[in-house]
């Protein structure tokens, strides 16, 4: 009777359908020493798998047949069920239980996943071998592509993966094994053998005038390899001999801001993927710039929202995007100390770089080490709100004061965000063809536990759009009430951010858009790269930062009989500034940037009411970059401010 009751509970909880309609395998995974259930253990067959819930139970829905079943969990030895499991139509084979042995304190292990580099599907039966001075170990991947090599003495190992029909691969770095721990995320994407090579082509032009840029460098990087090419006099390029698969493509040229293509580029064997074009923006006037990437030192994943500060002849700052990239422009030539920091990570030592006029100092990269503390996990499902069908490859992002984590949903819509320090997180989900969604409340992660059932039901999109959230760049916290504007050749859209900093701009026609943000008490500005909107696709996780104004307190534009106006307040070439004071008193009329730095002094004298014109240039005559600026009229005892947005 006990077995029947447990099975009924599992079927009701996990499947949500009548027991008689199910065909599959179920059971429980426990700790062999303590007998306690193991949550989040992976149970795999040759054709499907599942994770255990908080009680250690699992249910795999699968076709009738005979299967070999494996179970694995972090900190435990992998175990294979001692005999083949037979599944009959309309029945759930119960009692396929596992008691996993904890790893000994003197041994460690390595785990990861093996996938097909072209299709990104898991590879079952791949052989993974770890060799090192302290010993060797090996394992085969399960149907879900995961593997675990247990019982390895502490030390450094060279890890390789191979599978029938695929080229062998060596992990690019030596892997360190620590006693009593599993070194995770040692993943492989194997390239099918015998496939033809392909390529990528396109054109690189100057965004300001459409002219070709000769000598620009275009890079393509993918799981199997990489390639690069220089543009010809007409701006064209061709990267050849690329193995089939998906690539991240970026372009850069001296005197221009670097740019990453907005989506992965698929290369097919024997074909050239054409039309991968770039329009690069020139670096302004006599200024230079710094650019690079910020990643997690442990797993190599990009860090979103990291604050990067350049201190030198002028102070500049920027935050990283979802790919971990940043760009700091408008820097006068000279030596700069560049620093990076992010919530949940230890700050990196500063880098000293040289910035030259009209040039971008590239590859100023940082790898931040996560702060210490016990970890937990978040799990749930992502489904279609109309059909209740699972959504595969949805992107999940957890962000909070204690750190951040990413995950993708599997074919069952299940996801697991790992390695989160204990604390509260906001969790967001997005998928191609759906509106993004934020979980309606903070998710509390506890050390050593899985916070389950953080589920999302996404709504299919009706038109193109842009979504994301706005945050304060220094504190890295969400900001509500920010006006977000998307402007393009085919129209404009606007939205205000919600309590969680979220925004959604709907109804955008396919095309390229510029995103600007503005909020009282914060610097506005333009998102550092144009956004590509596709038909009936929402560009998600487009999340620009704003910064609290330093030295600028925005007040009313009218105090008593004093007046200040800026017309137009969004301009390309020039804007008129009109003021009126109660009496002729000494005034300063000046322009400040988003950090509160004075970039232009328009007047300093006793002025009668009148008008001044600002042409969007600084005191040196250099054209300033587009963004939000503040007009300040200051007297001995009063200050008025106005806002102007330069969109050149």
Image: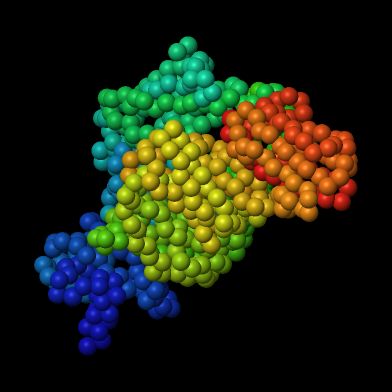
What residue appears at the point 72 percent right and 53 percent down from the top-left corner? 556
Report the side of 319 relative to 448 (left or right).
Answer: right
Q: Give the left or right position of residue 87, taking residue 105 as reference.
A: left
Instruction: Tell me what residue is drawn at x 75 percent, y 46 percent.
Output: 563
Q: How many labels does the image show?
A: 0
Nearer to us in this view, 114 or 534: 534
Up the image or down, 16 lies above or below 180; here it is: below
The residue shown at (73%, 38%) is 578
In the picture as drawn, the residue positioned furthest to the left comes out as: 89
Q: Is residue 643 in sight in this rendering? A: yes
Query: Which residue is depicted at the point 40% across and 20% down?
Result: 238
Quick one: which residue is furthest to the top in this view? 233
Residue 79 in sight here: no
Quarter of the image that includes the N terminus: bottom left
Could you say where residue 275 lies in the image, as x and y percent from the top left? 36, 25
Residue 107 image offset from top left, x and y in percent: 49, 60
Looking at the rendered image, the quarter that the C terminus falls into is: top right
- Indicate the position of residue 58 as horizontal and vertical percent values: 30, 70
Q: Which residue is situated farthest in the bottom direction here?
A: 1
Is 15 or 274 nearer to us in this picture?
A: 274
> Does residue 153 sit above or below 338 in this rendering?
below
Whether residue 385 is situated above or below residue 323 in the rendered picture: below
612 horizontally vs 173: left or right: right
The image's colour scheme reads: rainbow
Give the vertical position of 137 relative to 85 (above or below). above
Across and down, in percent, residue 300 comes to 52, 46
**Most foreground residue, 227 or 28:** 227
Indicate the quadrant where residue 516 lies: top right
């Amino acid at each position: 009777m006990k077995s029947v009751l447990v099975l009924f509970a599992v079927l009701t909880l996990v499947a949500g359908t009548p027991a008689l309609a199910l065909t599959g395998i179920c059971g429980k995974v426990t700790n062999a020493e303590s007998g306690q259930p193991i949550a989040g253990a992976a149970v795999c067959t040759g054709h499907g798998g599942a994770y255990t819930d908080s009680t250690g139970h699992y249910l795999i829905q699968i076709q009738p047949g005979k299967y070999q079943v494996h179970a694995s969990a972090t900190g435990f030895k992998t175990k294979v069920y001692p005999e083949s499991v037979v599944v009959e139509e309309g029945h759930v084979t119960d009692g396929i239980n596992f008691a996993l042995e904890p790893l000994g304190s003197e041994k460690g292990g390595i785990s990861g996943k093996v996938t097909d580099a072209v299709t990104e599907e898991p590879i079952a039966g791949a052989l993974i071998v770890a060799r090192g001075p302290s010993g060797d170990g090996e394992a085969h991947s399960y149907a879900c592509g995961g593997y675990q090599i247990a019982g390895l003495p502490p030390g450094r190992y060279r890890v390789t993966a191979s599978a029938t029909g695929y080229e062998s691969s060596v992990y690019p770095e030596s892997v360190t094994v620590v006693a009593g721990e599993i070194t995770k995320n040692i993943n492989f994407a194997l390239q099918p053998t015998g496939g033809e090579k392909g390529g990528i082509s396109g054109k690189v032009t100057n965004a300001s005038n459409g002219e070709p840029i000769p000598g620009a460098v275009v890079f393509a990087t993918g799981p199997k390899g990489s390639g690069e090419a220089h543009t010809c006099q007409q701006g064209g390029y061709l990267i050849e001999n690329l193995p089939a698969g998906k690539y991240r493509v970026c372009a850069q040229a001296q005197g221009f801001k670097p740019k990453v293509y907005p989506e992965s580029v698929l290369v097919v064997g024997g074909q050239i993927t054409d039309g991968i074009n770039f329009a690069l923006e020139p670096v302004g006037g006599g200024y230079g710039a710094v650019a690079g990437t910020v990643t997690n030192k442990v797993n190599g994943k990009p860090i979103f929202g990291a604050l990067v500060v350049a201190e030198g002849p002028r102070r500049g700052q920027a935050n990283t995007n979802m790919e971990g990239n940043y760009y700091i422009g408008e820097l006068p030539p000279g030596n700069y100390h560049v620093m990076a920091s992010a919530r949940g990570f230890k700050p990196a030592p500063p880098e000293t770089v040289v910035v030259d006029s009209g040039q971008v100092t590239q590859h100023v990269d940082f790898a931040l080490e996560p702060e210490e503390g016990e970890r937990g996990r978040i799990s749930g499902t992502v489904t279609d709100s109309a059909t209740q069908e699972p959504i595969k490859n949805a992107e999940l992002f957890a962000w909070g004061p204690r750190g951040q984590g990413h995950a993708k949903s599997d074919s069952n819509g299940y996801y697991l965000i790992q390695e989160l320090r204990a604390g509260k997180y906001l969790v967001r989900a997005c998928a191609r063809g759906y509106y993004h969604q934020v979980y309606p409340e903070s998710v509390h992660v506890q050390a050593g536990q899985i916070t389950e059932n953080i589920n999302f039901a996404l709504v299919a999109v009706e038109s193109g759009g842009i979504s994301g959230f706005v945050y304060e760049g220094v504190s890295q916290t969400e900001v509500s009430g920010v006006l977000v504007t998307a402007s393009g050749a085919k129209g404009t859209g606007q939205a205000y951010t919600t309590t969680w900093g979220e925004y959604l701009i709907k109804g955008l026609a396919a095309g390229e858009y510029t995103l600007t943000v503005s909020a009282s008490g914060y610097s506005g500005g333009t998102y550092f790269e144009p956004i590509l909107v596709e038909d009936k696709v929402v560009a998600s996780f487009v999340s620009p930062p704003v910064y609290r104004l330093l030295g600028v307190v925005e007040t009313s534009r009218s105090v008593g009989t004093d007046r200040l106006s800026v017309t137009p307040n969004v301009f390309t070439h020039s804007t008129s500034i009109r003021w009126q004071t109660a009496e002729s008193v000494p005034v300063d009329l000046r322009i400040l940037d988003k950090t509160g730095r004075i970039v232009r002094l328009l007047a300093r004298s006793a002025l009668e009411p009148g008008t001044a014109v600002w042409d969007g240039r600084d005191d040196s005559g250099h054209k300033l970059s587009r963004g939000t600026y503040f007009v300040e009229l200051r007297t001995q005892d009063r200050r008025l401010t106005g806002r102007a947005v330069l969109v050149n």
